Image (cartoon, grey):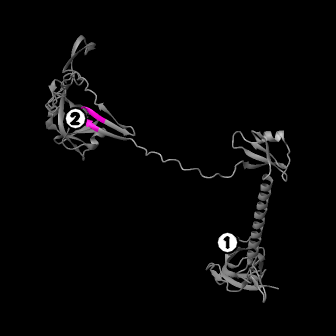
Amino acid sequence: MEGNRIEKRTDLLRGVTLTRLDRLFAEGDKEAHKFVIGLTLGNSVVTLDSGATVTGHFIRADDSTLPPIKGTVEEGKAVLTLPEGAYKITGYFSLIIKANVGGMSCAVFWGDGAITRTSTDTIVDPDHTIPSLDELLTKIAAVDDAIARADAAAEEARQAAQSANFTVLDHYDTLDLLKAAHPTGKPGDAYAIGMEEPYDVHIWGVDVQDWVNIGQLQGAQGLPGEQGPAGANGVSPTISIEAIDGGNRVTITDANGPKVFNVMDGKDGSPGTNGSDAQAIVYTINGKNADSNGNFELNASSVGARPDTWMPTAAQVGALPSTYTAPVSSVNGETGAVTVPVLKLAYLQYDASWSDSQNALQIPTSAFSNPASTTDASKMCFMIQIYGKTCFIGDSFVSGSYLYIRVYNSSWENWGTGERVNIIYQTA
């Protein structure tokens, strides 16, 4: 017989929504409900292959999950029947059914419902009430406990009866020594065991056939003795400190009275020797002293720098003098020491400017000692220094009243109008 048939249709485009299962799911049922899930994709029907996998996942009210429930494919639809385990626990449950669609596993149904109880633990008939299983188990446990306590009381009584009439025959330091000397005994045999009093008494246990420790020998408690006389009140020592001239007076008072003694301050030590006089530190730079605040005011001559008006000689810049005599084999047919005139050099320090249009230094020809020489500018300039660095010289030329010199060095990149350059050039 086929159980309750629950048919649902799921549109895979819209996704799976929760279905409230309001049918009766009774406790103790088995395979009582069969779910048939048809699939669509919009308006198109999706037919599952006969070999497609259908699996159900059932979560009971006790938060336990059943093993995966294997379903089938019937007429292209996912079919799943609930097993017996789904009806074991009453309360709310959750069911999710998955199917292999298009090569991937996806959920095709999601529902929840409730397993309804069909009976209680108590059955009532017209004459008697049958207790629930929980009540029966509680009563059985209570009976077992009462029996155990009765057995324990009986054993205590038997041991007390045995120990009520015994004779301590000897003493041994340890139980092992007793057992070595007396492996067995007779009812009423007892021995004292221990290194010092009070000793533990071991009697021969007839039932267990072994020596049993019944504790230390102790008689009944005696009557309370008379109260002794009250003791004298104790005295807690006190300490007081009083300042006196040159120290402190300490007084300690106990049961025997006060005891006083003085603690004097130590004597002053002898004076130390005087330290040596401090010596002033005088700073000078190139013979120039600092002012009262330790500051110096320096000029070019103070630090050995060249003044702005300094003009180097030919020797200082490594040039030849205006006339130079050199020993040669012959000059123009003459032999011996011959005087040869050389080029004359001049030094110019000028606030030049940079000409963007000419991409060169721009210097008025009037700045030179012999302006006429600037007409042959390519032979005129020998060395240029910018920011103190010697620059490589390119071509130079005269245009109008200005001399233009191209310089191959990165120094010109930050050149500003009015910057100072050093120029060594040829004179007539």
| Coordinates of residue 259 in the picture (x, y in percent) | 35, 35
Residue 25's image quarter? bottom right
Query: Residue 106 lies in what quarter of the image?
Result: bottom right
Magenta segment's dominant SS is strand
Instruction: Please tell me how crowded label 1 is: few (under 14), some (14-19), or many (20+) other residues with Cα within 10 Å.
Output: few
Q: Write down the residue under mark 2.
A: 377
Which quarter of the figure has residue 250? Answer: top left
Q: Residue at x 80, y 85 (%)?
A: 2
Q: Which residues are magenta?
A: 242-249
The single residue placed furthest to the top in the displayed view is 336
Q: Amino acid at mark 2?
A: Ala
Give the residue pinned by disc 1: 63
Give the label on residue 200, or none.
none
SS for tag 1?
Answer: loop
> Is any atom of residue 220 visible in this view?
yes
Q: Is 379 or 413 nearer to us in this picture? A: 413
Sequence-wise, the earlier of marks 1 and 2 is: 1
Count of numbered circles in the view: 2
Pick the front one: 264 or 93: 264
**81 and 323: which one is in front?**
81
Relative to 297, does residue 40 appear above or below in the rendering?
below
- Viewer can see residue 41: no
Q: Nearer the viewer, residue 318 or 240?
A: 240
367 in magenta: no
At 39% from the left and 37% from the top, the residue drawn is 256
Given the image, on which type of amino acid does mark 1 rest? Asp
Q: Position of residue 360 (x, y in %)?
A: 25, 42
